Image (cartoon, grey):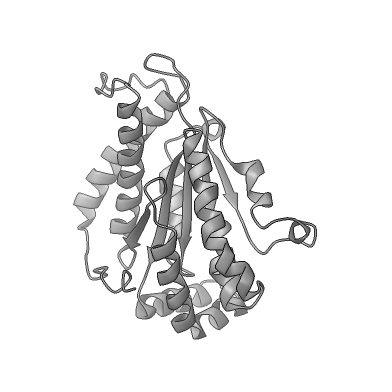
């Protein structure tokens, strides 16, 4: 299990190249989102799209999500964030609380954290028993396969940053009055347990990577590269799914998407 070690965190994108690639990818994404919703193209309502973000604290999830949804009408995408389950949520199976936010046909949802908390923070911090988190790998894979069988396009990201870059971002947040709220004592405690979390992440990547829900590990030390990678990866996943369903993906004339 060494998938994280294989990621080249030294890669960088020049500002001009990053801007050009991001703009092109966002245009692709806008067209694809409208095709999924049946607003353009042959007006078929397409399959649901769910994009899942996991990653280290300060790994750039928020910035990547912000760019991903930037060209989209707020009516066409839902962004949901998950923290620790409430008392009532803990009375149910751990997957129960995620069902209400999942997109239906023609819909799109972006999840900031997800059901993978069971095999990450709940495992490392002891919030789930060993029997519970070990059983969860199979439950998660079957859950995702069920969603895929109904047509869902599932794109999963692990945002990866080095310990050094994470520390630099922590310190930047601590020194910025408008961002200090994003840094909590829990973030520092999690950082101290990074070795334990790395073991959990590697096992998660190994045991829950499957054809219906492959993991995309994004090098995040360079924020430009991470954001471009995320949007381009989502576009590629949607294009593959739509092409398999016979959609015409040829690019129309500029400005014909119908969005402001």
The answer to whether any part of residue 221 appears in the image is: yes
- State the residue at coordinates (34%, 60%): 217
**For this view, does 198 lie left or right of residue 180?**
left
Quadrant of the drawing holding the C terminus: top left
- State the residue at coordinates (51%, 83%): 193
The answer to whether any part of residue 113 appears in the image is: no
Relative vertical location of residue 189 with respect to residue 82 in this rendering, above or below = below
Relative vertical location of residue 231 with respect to residue 243 in this rendering, above or below = below
Residue 208 x/y as whole percent: 44, 58
Quadrant of the drawing holding the N terminus: bottom left
In the foreground, 117 or 228 = 117
Residue 30 x/y as whole percent: 38, 32
Q: How many marks do you count on the picture?
A: 0
In the foreground, 246 or 67 = 246
**For this view, does 194 lie left or right of residue 121?**
left
- State the residue at coordinates (42%, 52%): 156
Res 22 → quadrant: top left
**For this view, does 245 lie left or right of residue 92?**
left
Name of the residue lying farthest toward the bottom? 192
Residue 110 x/y as whole percent: 51, 46
Name of the residue lying farthest toward the top? 42
- State the residue at coordinates (40%, 71%): 202
In the foreground, 76 or 99 = 99
Residue 251 x/y as whole percent: 25, 23
Relative vertical location of residue 161 with respect to residue 16 in this rendering, above or below = below
């Amino acid at each position: 299990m060494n998938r994280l070690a294989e990621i080249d965190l030294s890669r960088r994108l020049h500002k001009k190249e990053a801007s050009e690639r991001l703009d092109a990818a966002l245009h692709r994404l806008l067209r694809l989102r409208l095709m999924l919703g049946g607003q353009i193209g042959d007006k078929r309502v397409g399959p649901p799209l769910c994009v899942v973000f996991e990653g280290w604290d300060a790994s750039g999830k928020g910035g990547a999500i912000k760019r991903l949804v930037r060209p989209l009408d707020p009516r066409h995408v839902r962004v949901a964030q998950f923290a620790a389950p409430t008392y009532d949520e803990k009375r149910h199976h751990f997957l129960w609380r995620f069902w209400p936010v999942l997109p239906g046909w023609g819909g799109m949802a972006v999840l900031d954290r997800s059901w993978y908390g069971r095999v990450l923070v709940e495992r490392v911090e002891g919030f789930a028993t060993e029997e519970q988190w070990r059983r969860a790998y199979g439950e998660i894979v079957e859950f995702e396969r069920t969603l895929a069988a109904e047509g869902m396009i599932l794109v999963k990201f692990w945002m990866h940053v080095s310990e050094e870059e994470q520390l630099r971002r922590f310190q930047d947040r601590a020194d910025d009055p408008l961002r200090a709220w994003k840094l909590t004592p829990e973030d520092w405690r999690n950082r101290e347990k990074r070795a334990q979390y790395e073991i959990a992440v590697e096992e998660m990547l190994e045991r829950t990577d499957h054809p219906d829900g492959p993991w995309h590990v994004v090098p995040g030390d360079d924020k430009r590269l991470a954001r471009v990678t995320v949007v381009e990866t989502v576009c590629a996943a949607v294009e593959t799914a739509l092409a398999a369903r016979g959609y015409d993906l040829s690019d129309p004339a500029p400005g014909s998407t119908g969005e402001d």
